[in-house]
C-alpha cells in the first residue's frame, strides 16, 4: 500500500508527471493512472480458503505422531526409517494431488504422461 501513497504524493504534492512517477517507482503508467483515480486505499478482502488437499491427511499425520510418542524407546522407529516412511507417504499424497490437478480427478494413464 505504500506505493499507492508514493504515487499520490508524487502527483498531487510534488506535481510530478505520470511518466516520471512510473519511471521512478518502476510501475506501468496505467497503474499510476488507476491509483490516481481511486478515492480511498484499496482494502484486501480475504476469501474463505478451502482446505488444501493435504488438509484431509492432517488427522492421519497427527495420529501417526501420537502413536509413535506412545511406543517404548526400543520399539520406536529410528529417525532415518521414520523419514523414509514419511517421505514415501508424502510422495503418494503429492502424486494424488498432481493427478487430480492434471486430469481432473480421473486416473492418469500412460498416454497422459507422454
Image (tube, helix red, strand yellow):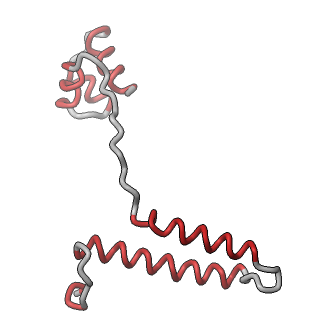
Q: Nearer the viewer, residue 39 or 72?
A: 72
Q: Is residue 100 above or below residue 50?
A: below
Q: Identify the residue shown where x is 20% and y is 21%.
A: 18
- Find residue 102 and report its horizontal and vertical position in percent: 25, 74
Q: Quadrant of residue 66?
A: bottom right
In the rendered image, which quarter contains the C terminus? bottom left
Q: Identify the residue shown where x is 40% and y is 60%.
A: 52
Q: Is residue 68 above or below residue 55?
A: below
Q: Nearer the viewer, residue 88 or 34?
A: 88
In the rendered image, which quarter contains the N terminus? top left
Q: Identify the residue shown where x is 74% and y is 72%.
A: 69
- Find residue 13 and report its horizontal and vertical position in percent: 31, 8
Direction from residue 73 to residue 101 in the image, left or right: left
Q: Quadrant of residue 112?
A: bottom left
Q: Identify the residue shown where x is 24% and y is 24%.
A: 35
Direction from residue 67 to residue 105 in the image, left or right: left
- Find residue 109 and report its horizontal and vertical position in percent: 24, 89
Amino acid at each position: 500500500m505504500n506505493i499507492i501513497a508514493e504515487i499520490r504524493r508524487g502527483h498531487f504534492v510534488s506535481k510530478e508527471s505520470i511518466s516520471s512517477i512510473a519511471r521512478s517507482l518502476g510501475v506501468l503508467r496505467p497503474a499510476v493512472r488507476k491509483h490516481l483515480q481511486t478515492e480511498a486505499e484499496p482494502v484486501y478482502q480475504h476469501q474463505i480458503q478451502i482446505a488444501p488437499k493435504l488438509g484431509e491427511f492432517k488427522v492421519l499425520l497427527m495420529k501417526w505422531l501420537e502413536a509413535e510418542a506412545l511406543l517404548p524407546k526400543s520399539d520406536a522407529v529410528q529417525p532415518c526409517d521414520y523419514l523414509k516412511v514419511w517421505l514415501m507417504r508424502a510422495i503418494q499424497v503429492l502424486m494424488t494431488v498432481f493427478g487430480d490437478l492434471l486430469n481432473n480427478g480421473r486416473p492418469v494413464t500412460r498416454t497422459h504422461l507422454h
